[in-house]
Amino acid sequence: MSFLFVYFLGNTVSFAQSTLDQLWEVKAIDTTNYTPAYLGNGIIGFKSLKSGLGAERVVINGLYDRSAIGDNVRLINYFNPMNLNLTFKDKSDLEFGSKVSNWQQSLNLKEAILTTSYSYGGILNVKSEMLALRNLPMTTMGIYEFTALADTEFTIKNVMKMPDRSNSSSIYKPYANYGLYRLGNSSKEKIAVMSAGFPTESGTDCVAGANTYFFNGHSPEIKYTKLDNNNQQCAFTIKLKKGEKFSFTILSAFTHSRFTKDVYNDAVRICSKDYNLGYSKLVASHKLEWEKLWKNDIEIDGDNEAQIDVRLGLYSLYSSITNGFELSIPPCGLAETGWGGHIFWDAELWMYPALLVMKPDFAQSMIDFRFNTLNQAKNRAAQFGYKGAMYPWESDLHGNECTPISYKLDMNEHHVTADVAIAAWNYYQVTKNKLWLKEKGFPIIKEVADFWVSRAEKDEKGLYHIKNVVGPDEYFEDVDDDAFTNGAVKVVLDAAIKSAKLINKEEDAMWTDVLNNIVILKHKDGYTLQNAQYTGQKIKQADVNLLAFPLEYITDKKQIEADLKFYEPKIDPNGPSMSYSVLATSYARLEATDKAYQLFQKSYQPNRKPPFGFISEKPRKSASVFCTGYGGMLQTVLFGFAGMNINEKGLYQNKANLPSNWKKLTIKREGKKDIICVK
C-alpha cells in the first residue's frame, strides 16, 4: 500500500493526490523549528528525537510524585533508558548536525510507527523505527538498521541513567543490574537484560525499567559496564565493510509500585515476554491492535487537510489511553507533563465526549477513574465544609488536589465537579448500562448533586446563587453566578432526579428546589451574562457559549445567536484553542456551515507545529500535544458537522451540516453501522 506524504512548513500544508485510505502518513524533511512526534500506548508516552536514536523524554502513566521540597506534583518523567549513542573508531560521536544529509521522518498514524532515515558523514546510513507497543503497554521498542557507505567500525552504547537517590530514606533502594536469564527450565537460550530500579523523589514509590536486545543474524558480544552508582551501560562494537548492514532491536519495559509490588522483577518479566517468538511477532501484534483501534475512524471526503488533522486528533487521544488500568487523560496526553500530567476538566468536557462516541470503553476508563476517586472527593468536600463530593481542579491518581499553592491558593474552579457528574450521566445515556449506573454512575451523580445543594446560597426571593467561583474564563476569579457553572449545576441536578427514578432511589427534594430556582443572569441587551461582575472585558475562553453546547441548556436559536455574536470577539486570540471549536459546533447546528468551518479551522490550524502538525495549547510556543484541543476539534466534527447528539434517547443523529467542500463524512465505529453524512 502506498501512503500520502504530507509536508508541514510552518503552519502550511500541502497534499499529493490521494484517496481516503492513503491519508495516514505525515512526512517531515526539514528539521527547522522541529517539534517532536508523539508515540504512546496509554501507559508509556514519548516524544521523538531528530536522530531517531531514542526519545526526548519518556512519560510513565499512573504514578505521580511530589518533589521533596516544594509543592510540584507530576507524572513520572525522569527515567529514559531508550537512547543510543554511537562512537566511531576515531572516538568521534554521531552528532546530529552538519554531517547529516537526506534526513526524513515519517509518522504512520495507521500503525503508530515513526521511521527515521538519513546519511551520516558519508560513512553510514541510519534507519530506525520507534514504537510504543500497543499490545504490551508497559513497553517501547526501537528497531535500528545501519548500512555502511564505507568500511567502518563503531560502538553502540545504550546507557541506563538513574537519578541520584543515595540520600533517600525510602524503603526502596536504588538497584542496577545486568544478567543473562533463561526463558524456561528447559531452555538453553539466555537473554541479556539490563535493569534498574529506584525510589521516586519523595521516596514513597518505586520506578523500574529493563532493556533487552534482539539481533538479526550475527549477535555481537555485549559489554556491560557499571559507569557509576547511578549509570550503567550495555555496548557492542560493530565492524562493517562498505555495503554491509547491521540491525538490532531494543525492547524497553517500565513499571512502578502503583502497578505491582514486585517492581524490580516485573520489569524484567515484562521485558522478556514472548522473547522467544522474536521482535517481529511483537511488532505484528502491535499493528494488529492499531488495526482494531482504527475500526473507529472518521473519514472526510473532499478535504484532505481536515482528514489528516482529524486523524492526528484521534491518534493523539488513542495513544493516551488504554483499557485495564482505569486511568484518564491529562491535557497533553502522555506526550509531556504540562500541568503536571494532572487530570482536569479537560478530560470530561473536551476529550471524553469524542471518545464516548468513537470508543466507549476508553470513555468508561475515564469515568471509572473518577468513581475510584469518589471517596477522596467526598473527603475534600467535608474538609471545606460542604456535603457530597468535591473533585479537585487538578487531580492525581488518588483524587488529591494537585494545583500548586504557589500558583493559586484559593481553588474555586468548582465547575469540574459538575463536569464529572455530567460525564457519568452521558455515559449512561449512550450505553444504557443500568447496572453501571446503579453501581458507579449514580453514586457520582448523587454526591455531586448534594455538593451543589450545599454550595448554593438562597436569597430572600427564594432564588439560588453560587458565589465566589472561577468559571472557565480564568481571567476573572472569585465571581458570582458564573453562567457555565450555574448551567452545569442545573444539568447535574436534572440528571440526579432522572437517574434516581431509573434505579428506584429516593430523590432529595432540594435537588428540584435548587434546579428550578438557581439563576442564569441575562444582560438587558439580550445576551446571557457571563457572571454578576462581568462588564464586557476580554475573556480567556468560552464560558457562556458552553450553555448551548455541550450543555444544551440554552436551546433557543435567537439566544444562541445573540451569545455567539457577543462573546466571539471577546475571546483572547492567544488563549487556549478549544473556544473556537465550541463556537463552530453551535454555528454548524444553526446551519451556518461556512462560519462553522472557518471557526473549525481556527480552533486548531494556528496551533499546528512543524513538522508533523501536532497542535499546541496556544498559537505561540506552548505545550503540545494538546489533546484537549483535539477533543474540541473532534466534537465539532461529530456533534456539529455530523449532527450527533446525546440525550435520554441515547446517541443519535440530527441533521448533518457539512462544510461546502466536504462531499461526504463517515463515522466508523466497530460493531456498529456507519454513520454516513452527505450533502
Image (cartoon, helix red, strand yellow):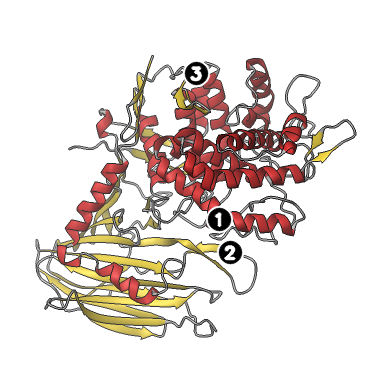
- First in residue order: circle 3 vs circle 1: 1
Q: Which mark is residue 73?
A: 2
Q: Closer to the camera, 376 or 105?
A: 376
Whole-percent x, y for residue 408 in the image: 71, 56
Evaluate if marks 1 and 2 touch, with contact meaning CB atoms under 8 Å apart.
yes
Q: Front-most of 298 and 220? A: 298
Q: CA distance from mark 3 to mark 1?
A: 35 Å
In this rendering, is residue 136 above or below 497? below
Residue 620 appearing in the image = no
Would you say 267 lies left or right of 202 here? left
Rounded to the nearest whole Å, what is the CA distance between mark 1 and mark 2? 8 Å
Task: State the residue at coordinates (53%, 82%).
Answer: 168
Residue ID for mark 3: 593
Q: Secondary structure at mark 3?
A: helix
Reading the image, the residue beneath label 1 is 342
Q: Quadrant of the N terminus?
A: top left
Element marked by disc 1:
loop
The percent coordinates of residue 511 (x first, y second) are 71, 37
Labels 3, 1: front one: 1
